Amino acid sequence: MVTVMHKVRAFFGDREGVTAIEYALIAGLIAVVAFGSMKFLGSNLSALFGTIGSSIATAPSTTSG
């Protein structure tokens, strides 16, 4: 019984994996923010390029024949 308690205390006292978990959480947060901003900016840029494209298509021609 003593060895089990010793192993439990050693398990909860071990701090080696804490840094790796913190880095994983930070990387996950960065990925979520990057995905959200790309999604938001992607739709806005698509609308902007669509507007520019339709403006160019309806613009009068300036070439002389």
Image: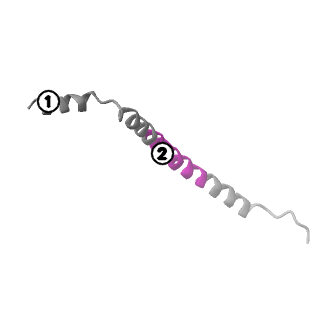
* Residue closest to the eye, 52 or 4: 4
Query: Looking at the figure, which quarter contains the C terminus?
Result: bottom right
**Which residue shows up at 68% across the image and 55% down it?**
52
SS for tag 2?
helix
Magenta stretch: dominant secondary structure = helix
**x, y percentage for residue 64?**
91, 68
Residue mark closest to the camera, 2 vs 1: 1
**Which residue shows up at 37% across the image and 37% down it?**
21
Residue 26, image quadrant? top left
Left/right placement of residue 48 relative to residue 15 reads: right
Give the mark nearer the N terminus: 2 vs 1.
Answer: 1
Check residue 55 in the rendering and tell me which mark sits there, or answer none: none
Span shown in magenta: 29-47
Going by the numbered disc 2, the residue's amino acid type is Gly
**x, y percentage for residue 50?**
63, 58
Left/right placement of residue 29 relative to residue 56 reads: left
**Which residue shows up at 50% across the image and 49% down it?**
39
Query: Looking at the figure, which quarter contains the N terminus?
Result: top left
* Residue closest to the eye, 32 or 25: 25
Q: CA distance from mark 2 to mark 1?
A: 46 Å
Left/right placement of residue 18 relative to residue 32 reads: left
Check residue 5 in the rendering and tell me which mark sits there, or answer none: 1
* Residue closest to the eye, 53 or 46: 46
* Residue closest to the eye, 48 or 28: 28
Check residue 36 in the rendering and tell me which mark sits there, or answer none: 2
Q: Is residue 28 magenta?
A: no
**x, y percentage for residue 59?**
76, 60
SS for tag 1?
helix
